Image (cartoon, rainbow, N blue to C red):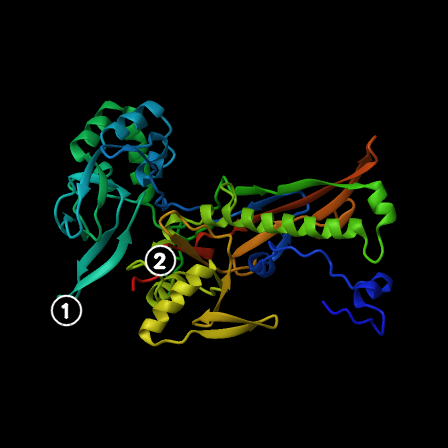
Amino acid sequence: MSTEPRLSLDTRAARNLATTTKTRPQMQAITSRWLLRRLPWVDVSGGTYRVNRRLTHRVGRGRVSVVLNGADDVRVIPDTLPELPPLRGFDDPDVLAAIAATFAPREFQAGDVLAEAGAPVTETYVVAHGRLNRLSVGPYGDTQLLGVVTDGQHLGEEALTRDGPTWPCTVRAATAGTLLVSPRQDLQRLLDASPALREHVERYVEQASKPVNRRGEAAVAVASGHTGEPVIDGTFVDYDLHPREYELSVTQTVLRVHTRVADLYNDPMSQLEQQLRLTIHEIRERQEWEVLNNREFGLLHNADYDQRISTWSGPPTPDDLDDLISMRRKTRLLLAHPRAIAAFFRECNKRGLVPGSVDVDGHEIPAWRGVPIFPCGKIPISDQQTSSIVAMRTGEDDQGVVGLYQTGLPEEHEPGLNVRFMEINSQAVMSYLVSAYYSAAILVPDAIGILENVDLAAPRV
């Protein structure tokens, strides 16, 4: 330390007279929230949004849940058996428990052939864990991969609905895993023993035989290409009698600020304003998480199972994204975890491909086939380091995905969000109720698709 006398005022002393330039309070958890920004938002004046659709005859394929109590104790959860199309809507718990009891675990290894094309269907399969490939022979004798069957999916439910069914394709194991297998004779025995089950299945078969369009909706009879004066059939468009209704969800918190802080410490920034700003950011972050992950209305849980596909080989390849985009018209955006985007770029690098980009509100966003790929860290990553990539068509005019909110709320601070003064308690603390009302709706099933089981693990060196 220098012992010479100073010739001027020390900077440390000078700071006592200086005005400090300060930032607003910063927050690490703020993200770009691309999903909330890109969704078209519909004002729901009554708090409920009803999605009317044409009557659909074709029953979708859900996924059966499995419980694992040990390596040798794998069971079907009976309440999820109505995810099998022939059992959709059947609710007799005793019969469902009896059907679940017919399923027994069976291990398989990679390369095992579980079913041959053209062979009789003698068993119904539910995949407890593992990956199966559906194969067929192409027109030139080569083997074609039709699709992938993974956890919770099922095969051979024709054993319940048809006499003498045969496998339409060959099923071969791509990995080792576990199947739950129900013999056809056991299912037939339950059909004979339960008149209610037989009546339900017969009703399903009758409905499945009705004429439908390529999307499974009740057909509309039209005539074309005729000449002369033929009799033209009359028709009508039938509606679903039980349309789905979405009620607005809510995220709330009570913001507390001491009156002494609000009165005295407001220069140069309002304490209440900054407290409220950061609180609203946190609410909006939770809102985006709920729009994706809420089990009642979240997009990841409400996407139709027929619109879910698995990757061909594990990591997300250009082929996988091509398949995902091709499942719908006018795919407006792709949504993926940043690690999933990085995994996709690695696959592009292997092939020597350079993904394009598009300008979105002044931001350069990576794109594939002209569809922007937006990062979203709220898409979950499983313990096995797998995630999902979401593709969406948006807007009411295009029968896509829409966000729901209500405007004109009392003491509204932002659209769909209000801040209401509650009280000043005996400790001189002011309380404000901050509420955000929102939901999301999928207008038709093909508005959203999901690429599942996306492997994020980096390749081994």
- Tag in front: 1 or 2: 2
Tag 2 or tag 1, which sits nearer the N-term?
Answer: 1
Place of residue 424 in the rendered image (x, y in percent of width and height, measured from the top left): 83, 35
Q: Amino acid at mark 1?
A: Tyr
**Where residue 33 sits: x, y (%)?**
58, 58
Image marks 1 and 2: residues in contact by CB distance under 8 Å:
no
Looking at the image, which is closer to me, 425 or 369? 425
Q: Amino acid at mark 2?
A: Ala
Helix, strand, or loop for circle 1? loop
| Residue at x-position 68% and y-position 46% | 45
The answer to which image quadrant residue 139 occupies is bottom left
Q: Find residue 235 and report its horizontal and vertical position in percent.
A: 44, 51
Residue 457, labelled with which disc? 2
Can residue 203 be seen here? yes
Residue 105 left/right relative to 290: left
Residue located beneath label 1 in the image? 140
Q: What's the residue at 15%, 66% (across, down)?
A: 142
Q: Nearer the viewer, residue 135 or 356?
A: 356
| Marks 1/2: CA–CA distance | 36 Å
